[in-house]
Image (cartoon, rainbow, N blue to C red):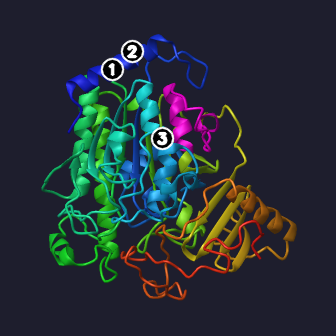
Amino acid sequence: MSPTRRDVLKTTALGSIALAAGVDNVFGQQRTAPPNIIYIMADDLGYADVACYGRPDVKTPNIDRIAARGVRFLQGYANSAVCTATRVALITGRYQYRQRLGLEEPLGVANQRVGLPPEHPTIASQLKKAGYGTTLIGKWHLGDLPNFGPLKSGYDHFYGFHSGGIDYYRHEGTDHKPDFWDDDMPIEKIGYATDLFGDHAVDVVNKYAKARNPFFVSLHFNAPHWPWEAPGDMDEAERLKTRNLGAYDAGTQKTYRGMIESMDTAIGRVYKALDDNRLTNNTIVIFTSDNGGERFADTWPFTGHKMELLEGGLRIPSIISWPARIPQGKTSEQVSISMDWMPTLLAAAGGSADPAYPLDGINLLPMLTGASPIQRRTLYWRFKGNAQRAVRDGDMKFLKIRDNTFLFNVVEDPLERANLKQRQPEVFERLANMWIEWDQTMLPEVEESGTGGNNAAQWADHPVTPATRTPDNPGPGRFVDTPPPGGPGGRRGAPPQ
């Protein structure tokens, strides 16, 4: 259910305490009011799938407005090439491989044993401690009731679905069971999911604004994730009623564009609520995606898609607006990643991380404001499907796919075409060994975790030997590949060859 007056008054009081304490912001100045925060996440949106990132056939004026009023990252990354793992990193501010849940690629609908531990601090729980009202609208996908859920992980309120995807009209998950919730109560609603999430976000913003309460709203759309249903596609929803929601005979570019533009319209309504309540200037609005694009996505100038550690599977649109503090209409070459948002938002809100769970992400505000120069980054990834491994260090990227290894300069060669491992063997060996050293600090891959991959059975431009469909991975592209010798990750402790 929506925030109650008692909830709002409680968090307002906490916010007043925080203000009375005179918490300094990142600029070393006294804050007159904490910023409100709206974190908008699309699902499976490609790097170039919105107009401000170059897509010419999609109209996204409201997402473009976020960029016009803020900073657009040109080197923004997802923590994973699939949804659950990235969401673990986002909500904890740490590499997802530190959590058993983060090994799922993605979490299967039948897996009731794995989820985000309620005792783990999250971006929502830490902002709540700083006096914020916290609401999640849309997709959760971090574990099911009764053991896991948004209300157990720092959110005051939840309105959305628990699983990886729902039908936009019938609101059923991949198992064709109802999956729409108001807090921890199942509900029935009529309407297109994107519209319902946008409308609820407007209501929540209005109620927080009326109570003069600082808020953190996570607006996690399922768009443009399959099933491929644009506004008005009720017949397609009926056709998929007894079929796989991600059926490979479904979808068109027209449908995909309609799904994105519907999401943009919903974002516009949320922006209007901010404007009407005179909150826009001191509200942080972030727009991004959970991973790279799926089959209809535009990932130019990169190759690869969701479930691949090629740039197209990891690079995402990433935009932040905060008119009161951040320059407007700018782009940034700062390399960033999903787990950076927790330290960034805690710094903006005057909150703090739990020292027992040190963050792996960094605070991006100094680079965004020009207080600090661009920071060199070293980032790491794993993906069990097709035994993929990757490191980006500066401009260079080490990549392993099954038994094939590569070294690319992803700034000069974003298409990842020129394999430099023979020309720069020292760099290749250094990055390969860096990945091994980092991997030894993470949880090892486990045989029972779900994974996926794109292959020739479904993707005509991906001539990889099809793997075997398993009962735990019935969805499209969810396959368990035959692992190379030494287990799914290869030989731990020996550099990839």
Crowd around label 3: few <14 · some 14–19 · many ≥20 (10 Å) = some
* Magenta residues (range): 340-367
Relative to 454, 238 lies left or right: left
Relative to 32, 406 lies left or right: right
The tag on residue 94 is none
The foreground one among 100 and 154 is 100
Q: CA distance from mark 2 to mark 3?
A: 26 Å
- State the residue position of label 1: 12
Q: What type is the residue that disc 1 sits on?
A: Thr
The tag on residue 120 is 3
Residue 62: % across, % down: 36, 48
The foreground one among 415 and 93 is 93
- State the residue position of label 2: 16
- Asked whether disc 2 touches disc 3, contact meaning CB atoms under 8 Å apart, the reply is no
Q: What type is the residue that disc 2 sits on?
A: Ser
Q: CA distance from mark 3 to mark 1?
A: 24 Å
The residue shown at (45%, 15%) is 19
Q: Nearer the viewer, mark 3 or mark 1?
A: 3
Relative to 395, 182 lies left or right: left
Residue 320: % across, % down: 49, 42
Q: What type is the residue that disc 3 sits on?
A: His
Q: Quadrant of the C terminus?
A: bottom right
| Looking at the image, residue 289 lies above or below residue 473 | above
The foreground one among 281 and 366 is 366
Q: CA distance from mark 2 to mark 1?
A: 6 Å
